[in-house]
Each structure stands twice: as structure tokens, then as C-alpha cells.
Image: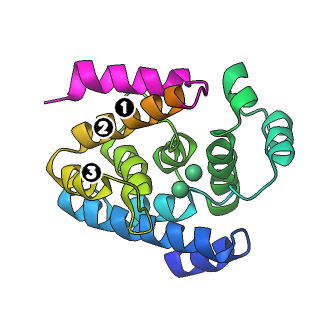
Amino acid sequence: MEINELKEELKRYLKEDRYKHSICVMEMSGRLAEHYRVNKQRVMKAALMHDMAKELPLDELKKYVINNEIYVSKMEMFVGVTLHGKVAADMCRKKYKFDKEMCRAISNHTTGKVRMSMLEKIVFIADKIDETRKYEGVENLRKLAFENINKAILQNIDNTILNNMKRGRPILEESIKTRNYILINEKK
Ligand SMILES: [Fe+2]
Ligand SMILES: [Fe+2]
């Protein structure tokens, strides 16, 4: 399916703000794909659809995960924040025939994952630095994403972990695993 058709599909799932975020993540992914010489179409499609399940109620996401036998850890099921990515990936594979790498990028966009490909890394970081994001330090992170994508991902995960700690929230194992993997194997 072409990007324009996917956009029309996405509109049925998302309210205006999140639709706009999705478009901006897609555009940022396109820029990063050019910079890092990755197939632009596939990155942009995955980026566009990454949050397609985000507005489904949590109990529906849980039901979808169970009924479609998607693997998620007990902690992820309990915390809930990553489920929309898992569900979106499954929907995109079945409805739009997205390939494995595109689906992995969607599935893991919240926490990252060990051994991410460049396509997956681009979708992950584009989601955190798109033009709709307004938090402190976002401009620096945007710059860093083009200079060293691994460092940018590390910085984002560190911030997420610290924020969760400050707020007394659980920290997902996947965030820690991703951080350690990049820190030890890929940070240059
Ligand atoms: Fe998301
Ligand atoms: Fe997002």
C-alpha cells in the first residue's frame, strides 16, 4: 500500500493531534533515512503507522494481545505502555503486509530493543524528536540524532528511565536491555 493510502487508513484510527504527530514522525524518519542511507519508503511507512493502535482502550489492547497470541512479558502487560506498539505491528503485518523489519520497528518503538537495525533505530528516535515534541533538550537530541544515532537513543532511554524513577514508576526491562546493548556494543 502506498503512503497516501496508509495516511487515509490512519485517519480512521487517530484524533487530529496524534495524526499530526504520526505525520511528523514520518517526515523526521524520511530525513534520517536519507542521512543514514536507508530505504526511505519502508522507514516512512513504519514511522507513519507506529501509533495506529494508540487510541484503542487498554482493555481492548490486552484482549487483542491475548486473542492474537502476541508475546508480551507479564510486566509489559501490567504496565501497558508498550502494548499499542505490539498491536500496531500485528495489524500492519496482517492488513498492509508490512515486512518483519518494519513490524519490529513498530513493535519496539516505545522501549527499543537489543540488536536494532538502522531502520528500527530511526523509527525509535524519530518518534521522540519529531516536530510536535516540545520538552526541554529536544533540540539537542534532534541534532544528536543526525550526528550519532546511538548516542541519541541512549540519551533518550536514560531520560526515560530517570523520569520513571523520579515519578515512582516501574522501569521496563526492555529499556534497560536496549540501553546496555547499545552502551556496550554500539556506542562509538
Ligand atoms: Fe507510541
Ligand atoms: Fe509516537
Determine if the C-beta at disc 3 is less than 8 A from ligand 2. Answer: no
Q: Is the residue under label 2 in contact with that under label 1 (CB below 8 Å)?
A: yes
Magenta part mainly helix, strand or loop? Answer: helix
x 32%, y 55%: residue: 138
Marks 3/2 in contact by CB < 8 Å: the verdict is: yes
Answer with left or right where residue 67 lies relative to residue 70. Answer: right
Q: Give the labeled residue for mark 3.
A: 141
Q: Amino acid at mark 3?
A: Leu
User: Which residue is more in the foreground, 117 or 1?
Assistant: 117
- Local SS, label 3: helix
Residue at left 60%, top 68%? 18
Label 1 is placed on what type of residue? Asp
Task: Report the disc number at residue 155.
Answer: 2
Sequence-wise, which precedes: disc 3 or disc 2? Answer: 3
Q: Which range of residues does the magenta coloring cover?
A: 167-188
User: Which residue is denoted by mark 1 in the rendering?
Assistant: 158
Q: Which mark is residue 53?
A: none
Residue type at the position of mark 2 = Gln
